[in-house]
Image: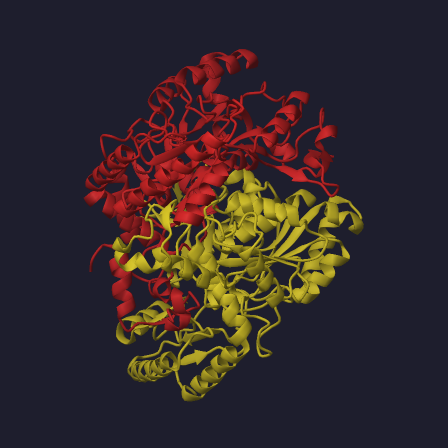
Chain colours: A yellow, B red
Amino acid sequence: MSKDLIGQLTEYAAGDAYPFHMPGHKRSPESGPLSALYQVDITEIDGFDNLHQPEDILLEAQKGAANLYGSEETYFLVNGSTCGILSAVSAVAHRGKILIMARNCHKAVYHAAFINHLDVEYIYPKLTDRGLAGGISAREVEELLLEIAGRKQISPKELCNTVAGIMITSPTYDGISSDVKNIVFVAHRYGIPVIVDQAHGAHFGFHPAFPESAVKEGADLVIHSVHKTLPAPTQTALLHRNGDLTDGDLVRKYLRIYQTSSPSYPLMAGIDFCMKIVKEEGKERLGKLLKMREDFLQKVEGLSHIKIDTEWSEAGKLLLFVEKELMTGREFYDILRDDYHLQMEMCGGDYVLAILTMMDREEGFNRLATALWEIDEKLREKADMEEREGKKTSYPELPHGKPEVFLPLYQAYIRPGEVVSLEKAAGLVAAEFINLYPPGIPLLVPGEMIGEEMISSFKKYLENGYTIQGIVTMDAGETGVKVLV
Amino acid sequence: MSKDLIGQLTEYAAGDAYPFHMPGHKRSPESGPLSALYQVDITEIDGFDNLHQPEDILLEAQKGAANLYGSEETYFLVNGSTCGILSAVSAVAHRGKILIMARNCHKAVYHAAFINHLDVEYIYPKLTDRGLAGGISAREVEELLLEIAGRKQISPKELCNTVAGIMITSPTYDGISSDVKNIVFVAHRYGIPVIVDQAHGAHFGFHPAFPESAVKEGADLVIHSVHKTLPAPTQTALLHRNGDLTDGDLVRKYLRIYQTSSPSYPLMAGIDFCMKIVKEEGKERLGKLLKMREDFLQKVEGLSHIKIDTEWSEAGKLLLFVEKELMTGREFYDILRDDYHLQMEMCGGDYVLAILTMMDREEGFNRLATALWEIDEKLREKADMEEREGKKTSYPELPHGKPEVFLPLYQAYIRPGEVVSLEKAAGLVAAEFINLYPPGIPLLVPGEMIGEEMISSFKKYLENGYTIQGIVTMDAGETGVKVLV
């Protein structure tokens, strides 16, 4: 019998076995458009192993993924990078009371700190010239470590009993990487594990034109969303573990806690299938993608009012900036979707973001190039017609002084809150996350004090068309924010 | 546009929209047997709402499910009943320090107590005459509540600030229900919420021959695995919330924490599709199932050595007991699978369990009836030939006195452990769960003392062919158990 999970599932479905077991759809062909999914959707019957106690085909599949990334241990995740992040942070939480994290980490990292009752110390990423969150440097990490040692009046050697771990996101949603290698070097000198949320970099390390993977750069725990930049189904991911600073038993314990005890075989088969494509064709396909990207960039050379970032983001992301006085990112995004049927991943105040993967086709690039020329032409007409007021796109400026922590996240996030108008919020304490998109950084975390300066910034961002999550419209139409009672 | 999720996904897939977004497979037809799944696998693009902030099609779908079950609020779960249980327990954890739970709850309930640092007080289910875990009664709940009040020297009125919630599993894996209605009545008299893990009873309440659903019986939080007994994909479930003893905001907060931020659309569409089948055809299909079951039971009337339980389990479960002196449950299970290609859900020491759902077909019942007659014939020959020693199948006897708690679960489960031989384990503290199958009840929970009597029981169960999870084989071949260092 083949050791390929999807092959084995398909073979099983073609047989005459009658299912007196879960799932309750019984692989019935009555399920219409979902029938193909249901055909290979089984439970842990004989021959199909058990994700939480793998001994056979799932153990082999995970070992294959570990080999591919050069990791000591790799785990398939069916609850997304979310459960990898929760498990990774939980598995280091016994080491110390403090989690050092980049302020632009995914909300799952904040959640992990919350449920593990960790005190959080932030590193604020510097912003790029276009207001995107940049990378974190090893120097910033070391400075914070020594600052903590000073503040806690402990020797640097004792930091490993105080700091549970260091958590960063690299690359970001926008494709901007941090200096993982040197951060690991610094952290390990103090005996502290590094967790890298590399959800957006599962394709790293498979072609020389892309950055190295955080696994190869020495991180202790690395999370890869295989559905984001590789051909795997949504909600699938990998967790890699390496080295002696973390405990494999504990990681597995937490994965059993945060993942369903009924993992989906189609999702697991999707990860397995993805690993095989990457192993056998990954380099070639990435090469083909880079070639298509190059051809595309040549085709759109000379656009007047649309700029393509080739400085900050890795090649798997395409950031298309538009002059905001002529068109907002949202308008740009809507036109691409409505007029050209090109669905972008997201938009910021003055840009749209496309995700490029090894499964992209020339058709997509050609249609995008045509669309950009046409839109650019319209922007040119508009620019010529309009009396330009010399407005310049304004970008966020962070940090606004680091907000003062009134209550730790793990105490504040469980407390009841009430909505008050922005006018009355100064001096009160945030009860919810207030996130600025872009760059996707919390301006306020539950438990942090709301300063006057912060409120002015909120207003400025809202006026400039930025999206601020956590700001609510009150009954009277006023802008409000949830504060601790 | 149709408000049916799978219809909308299929329609979108048939269009010419080019995906510059996740997932990275880009709905490519190159994905072989997974292509059909990938065709409808998208991310939160416009028109497809957001599970964690539903406003449109997913809000409507969840409201539809709430209407179907008669619940105030219903949430789609893509991380199985596991995340429903974690969220439900977490959402009541601020109410008090103690969780009252049936000892035969799913491991996710123990995990929820662990991560929420709850002290646990158990109600041990009585065992049926065949050694299965039976139901919990309202009287047992009330007795424990009053016992806790006495022990803590508080008035019964103060129990609602001491006991966070009461958690039971109903029905069990074997299909045995508890007296949910009266348990709720008792609990609410003391102002304490009841959480029912009804993972195996998602089909309850849709036909008069089946028990009423725990939602209708007044439980505050109810978890339904729609993939277990209804036609939905593996890993999908529902969480229902009702009444004023629990907080919807908190429940949603925890669902955002324990569920992936990239929920799978095929899984969500599967839940939606399942709700539609149940609504439109549920009663009729369940009626058809009951008819097939009745016909089957008539066909197998008169079997000599195989007994079908019609006393304890609900009609969605078929428990086939075999005389263990002639054949073990495992042998029975293997013969059904290998010789008849009838895959059962699981086996116990002297029985196999089949799950029957509204998607079953007459073919399955007919094949099973034929198989049972043939196996019974062989058993008769064997019984006639063999000198019967008058052995009787022995069943577990629980409890062995409730084990003494040395450390609370939330302290013990994170501590390092080591394996010692059973001979040396008396007087030491368990570091892992030791579960007996069947009835699927932990004999020991991490932090509990290992008594002499318990060790004798382990040996007896192992001799009798029971499976004990958590018992390990040591290098020297000895039987061992993990204890706290």
Number of numbered discs overlaid on the protein picture = 0
Residue B183 is drawn in which quadrant? top left
Residue B225 spot, x, y in % from top left:
38, 41
- Please state if A190 lies on the left or on the right of B178 as rendered: right
A253 lies above or below B99: below
For residue A378, above or below residue B138: below
Residue drawn at x 31%, y 54% is B269
x, y percentage for residue B217?
31, 26
Residue at screen point 61% across, 43% down: A118
Residue placed most toward the observer, A26 or A100: A26
Closest to the observer: A430 or B425? B425
Q: Quadrant of the N terminus of chain B?
A: bottom left
- Residue B106, image x, y percentages: 48, 35
Residue B11, placed above or below residue A249: below
Q: Quadrant of the C terminus of chain B?
A: top right
Residue sitting at 52 percent across and 69 percent down? A276
Q: Is residue A424 above or below residue A41?
A: above
Q: Could you tell whether A152 is left or right of B55 in the image?
A: right
